[in-house]
Amino acid sequence: MPKVLSTSVNADGGPHFEILAEAGFEVEAVDRTVDLFDEATLIGQMQGVSAISAGSEPYSAAVIGSLPDLRVISRSGVGFDAVDLAACDEHGVVVTVTPGVNHHAVAEHTIALLMGVARGFPGRHDRVKAGRWFREPYPRVMGSTLGILGLGRIGRAVATRAVGLGMTVLAFEPYPQQEFVETWRVELVDDLDDLIPRCDYISLHLPNMAETHHVINAQRLALMKPGSVLINTARGPLVDEAALIEALGSGPIRAAGLDVFEVEPLPEDSPLLGLDNVLLSGHVAGLDNESHEGTFEMVADTIIKLHAGQWPADRIVNMNGVTDWTW
């Protein structure tokens, strides 16, 4: 039976090992001592592998072309910007994601970052640890305005929680679900440059693609309200990080909550690490116990279905129009 390699972070254990093994697959976890972001190392680890339970390591055209046995890249999440889809199409490699599994986890993490920053963390925490007993008021979240960029599953999950906190919600979304917008009283704004100046908080939930690269840049940061906050739990390249660092130092924004970065892991010399008005986490927004189980159950189910000749189209992000793919 085919060999499946699990490369996803925090996936050395999970239901996919048992599910795939019971279906007759040979399943292994990648050697965690190696750097999978190095192409030569990644290629070396993937030799003889037919399917990958993939993390965010890069699958470039060079990598795909060096893996003749590879048939499936099953991403444990909904992002696939690290995968060269054209190269996968050329080599007959199916790329899949796990939709509808982790949106609640990301939404909760988004609100956690928003509330943490809103109440002055990590600064308050750091001052107490340093023996500095200092009282300072911050703006109340209830009654403030949240701008959501991207109203897909995650954006909608954030919107419902924000409404529950008493926030006014604006959103930029070219293809909105009208029933949701009306039910939750979300105001759609067609132009980002009109939305941004109206918001006390802005939360990013867009995919990473050419059209959204640096959608938050120096010009748009300058449009933000004095004292406003940026939250990013989507993809690092949505934000011009150098421009954000400058804005965090000189305004107009007050703070940022970031789970994703332009370079990951975040370099040890990143200026973000020296700022006291940023709250950071390491690309973990989509990870909770429930999403961990559900994600890897779907990863395994997708691989098994494809091997059996089924085509779970709602999970497949490439091979458009292909009808004769076999494994």
Image (tube, helix red, strand yellow):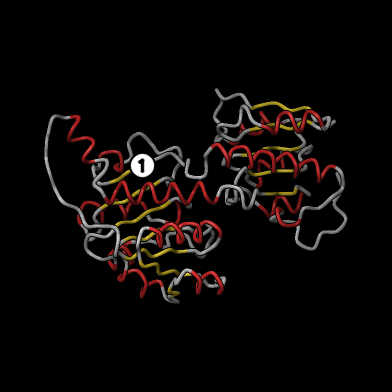
Q: Say which residue appears at 66% left-offset and 40% top-offset.
A: 63
Q: Could you say where residue 176 lies in the image, as x and y percent from the top left?
A: 55, 71
Question: Residue 124 appears in which quarter of the rendering?
Answer: top left
Total of numbered circles in the picture?
1
User: Which residue is pictured at 22% across the width and 61% down the height?
Assistant: 252
Image coordinates for residue 280, horizontal then vertical, percent: 36, 42
Image location of residue 226, percent across then percent down: 22, 63
Quadrant where the C terminus sits is top right
140 with respect to 239 (left or right): left
- Considering only vertical position in the picture, is 301 above or below 138? above
Residue at 45% across / 74% down in the picture?
188
Residue to which mark 1 is pinned: 280
Q: Quadrant of the N terminus?
A: top right
Q: Is residue 322 left or right of residue 226?
A: right
Identify the secondary structure beneath mark 1.
strand
Q: Residue at x 52, y 56 (%)?
A: 154
Asked if 264 appears above or below 146 in the picture, the reply is above
Please name the amino acid that badge 1 sits on: Leu
User: In the image, 269: left or right of 127?
Assistant: right
* Residue 153 on image: x %, y %: 56, 58
Observer-nearest of 89 and 101: 101
Q: Is residue 294 left or right of residue 320?
A: left
Residue 266, above or below 101: above
Q: Residues within 10 Å of mark 1 (few under 14, many from 20)?
A: some
